[in-house]
């Protein structure tokens, strides 16, 4: 069970949150090659190490934020608030 | 190697079973092989077996970081079935079930294969629609899937006393998949290893691959291991959750993520459930082993993970949802739990493919790969030996990502 650092509610139990998957780098420029576009679209980071991922405090304050979490130790190193429009743009589904 | 038979059993009984030969040999590690297979799990060993049996390639070494059969082949819920959705997936899994049915004989190894049907318990109308679609597509490809009503469901699974009309999610119907079976999962690994070793394949345990090595022209040259460099003309990466960890050492990026999927086992009880019960709306599935233990699986941990344990809230959710349908199970004690690292492409369809690096092959994206072990090995061996994908695995190449031609599959066990 993770204890997630909601930037508004503080340390809360994972069961209150929805995992919305890893963050993606910004959309590439429209002139990139097909291969680069496909890479951006389909290839996620999958390290044994820290990944940046989005969480939604669905059963709490309703805010979105990102954390860096270790994929083996589950250690969480940062928590940043996401811009308010992110939730509307990506929806809440994983 | 001695053939297993009633006669050999009786003969060895005379010497108090002290003279059985080893299942596989432990030869020294050579400098070069024709084919290297990374990962001595179900898929890796099956690939080695079919390379030798079907294509006559025996200059093969299987390298394993831990011990043989200690990965996901030891960490599944032993279910074999073919009730998938897509035209691309169904022939592959039908092939896998048919290979499984003849596998004990093929390997001369008793896998305790038990053809016992799977029943999907349906509690929502969207799932009912999806599963009826799978039923109709199954008919086209020879995978049976037939509807039964709630009364028949309760007759066949008497322990299923929850899910009544007053409950949170009343049961509205059920679907029976007759080809579904269970078998001894360790036996699959050991049987393939024994058969491959008999044919001359070398299996090297505790040989961890650190890096893939490439020639100046980019083709694969071999691997760097903790026991030195091993050269090969062809290398197959068959390591489930750690696929990207290995391929990234050669600069190859793959469209997969790794997740933790857990299962647990109850104390043994008397025969109670003689089918495999799957509850897709709740994300829990179970069957009873020959020893009487209930083998229970839940949904995956939603965040990427390389852990092999069980997260408390994932475990609780599986138990709570199971008790909704099987309230009597609240008195059971749970004996063991474990997790495995699975890899999945975002369309949930496996990848058996050559890669951009000549000579390097991958078999990954096995979201619940136990049922696919024979066909996965069979088709990967075909690809390695001939350079061409096998018919039933042809849609599973990496090309589908290059062309954004995804095969979005909903027939995986844990899809909710």
Image (tube, coloured by chain):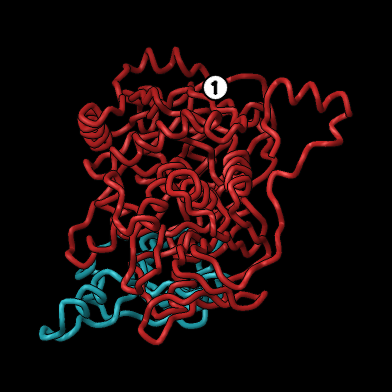
* Residue B103 drawn above or below residue B38: above
Chain letter tied to cyan:
A
Q: Which residue is tagged 1? A: B273
* Point 56% across, 35% down: residue: B107
* Residue B138 drawn above or below residue B240: above
Residue A68 appears in the figure: no
Q: Secondary structure at mark 1?
A: loop
Nearest the camera: B322 or B47?
B47
Measuring from the top left, give residue B277's x and y in whole percent. Answer: 46, 29
Say whether residue B5 is left or right of residue B14: left
Q: Residue lying furthest left in this view?
A: A31
Q: Toward which corner of the image does residue A41 lie, by quadrant?
A: bottom left
* Residue B87 drawn above or below residue B219: above
Q: Residues within 10 Å of mark 1 (few under 14, many from 20)?
A: some
Measuring from the top left, give residue B236's x and y in whole percent. Answer: 45, 63
Nearest the camera: B388 or B162?
B388
Q: Quadrant of the N terminus of chain B?
A: top right
Say whether residue B159 is left or right of residue B172: right
* Residue B322 drawn above or below residue B243: above
Q: Number of marks in the image?
A: 1
* Point 19% across, 70% down: residue: A89
Measuring from the top left, give residue B357's x and y in whole percent. Answer: 35, 74
* Point 55% across, 30% down: residue: B104
Task: Give chain B's shade.
Answer: red
Q: Chain of mark 1?
A: B
């Amino acid at each position: 069970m993770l204890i997630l650092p909601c930037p508004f509610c503080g340390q809360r139990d994972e069961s209150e949150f929805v995992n919305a998957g890893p963050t993606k780098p910004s959309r590439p420029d429209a002139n990139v090659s097909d291969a680069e576009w496909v890479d951006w679209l389909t290839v996620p980071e999958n390290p044994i190490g820290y990944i940046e991922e989005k969480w939604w405090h669905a059963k709490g304050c309703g805010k979105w934020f990102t954390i860096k979490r270790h994929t083996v130790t589950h250690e969480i190193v940062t928590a940043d608030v996401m811009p308010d429009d992110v939730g509307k743009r990506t929806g809440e589904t994983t | 190697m001695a053939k297993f038979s009633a006669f050999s059993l009786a003969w060895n009984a005379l010497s108090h079973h002290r003279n059985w030969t080893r299942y596989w040999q432990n030869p020294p590690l050579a400098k070069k092989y024709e084919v290297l297979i990374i990962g001595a799990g179900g898929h890796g060993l099956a690939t080695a077996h079919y390379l030798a049996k079907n294509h006559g390639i025996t200059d093969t070494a299987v390298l394993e970081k831990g011990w043989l059969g200690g990965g996901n082949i030891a960490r599944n819920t032993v279910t074999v079935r073919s009730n998938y959705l897509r035209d691309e997936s169904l022939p592959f899994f039908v092939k896998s079930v048919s290979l499984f049915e003849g596998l004990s004989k093929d390997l001369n190894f008793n896998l305790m294969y038990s053809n016992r049907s799977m029943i999907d318990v349906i509690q929502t109308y969207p799932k009912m629609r999806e599963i009826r679609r799978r039923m109709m597509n199954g008919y086209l490809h020879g995978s049976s899937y037939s509807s039964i009503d709630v009364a028949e469901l309760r007759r066949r699974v008497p322990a299923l006393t929850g899910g009544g009309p007053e409950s949170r999610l009343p049961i509205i119907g059920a679907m029976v998949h007759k080809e579904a079976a269970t078998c001894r999962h360790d036996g699959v690994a050991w049987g393939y290893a024994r058969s491959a070793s008999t044919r001359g394949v070398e299996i090297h345990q505790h040989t961890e691959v650190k890096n893939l090595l490439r020639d100046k022209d980019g083709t694969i040259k071999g691997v760097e291991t903790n026991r030195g460099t091993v050269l090969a003309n062809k290398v197959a990466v068959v390591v489930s959750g750690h696929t990207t960890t290995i391929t990234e050492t050669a600069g190859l990026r793959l469209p997969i993520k790794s997740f933790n999927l857990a299962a647990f086992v109850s104390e043994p009880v008397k025969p109670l459930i003689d089918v495999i019960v799957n509850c897709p709306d709740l994300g829990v599935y179970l069957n009873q082993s020959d020893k009487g233990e209930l083998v229970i699986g839940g949904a995956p941990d939603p965040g990427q993970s390389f852990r092999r344990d069980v997260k408390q809230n994932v475990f609780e959710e599986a138990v709570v949802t199971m008790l909704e349908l099987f309230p009597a199970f609240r008195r059971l004690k749970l004996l063991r739990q474990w997790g495995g690292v699975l890899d999945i492409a975002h369309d949930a369809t496996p990848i058996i493919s050559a890669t951009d690096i000549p000579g390097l092959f991958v078999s990954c994206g096995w979201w619940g790969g136990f049922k696919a072990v024979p066909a996965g090995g069979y088709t990967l061996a075909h690809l390695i030996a001939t350079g061409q994908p096998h018919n039933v695995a042809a849609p599973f190449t990496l090309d589908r990502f290059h062309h954004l031609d995804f095969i979005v599959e909903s027939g995986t066990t844990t899809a909710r």
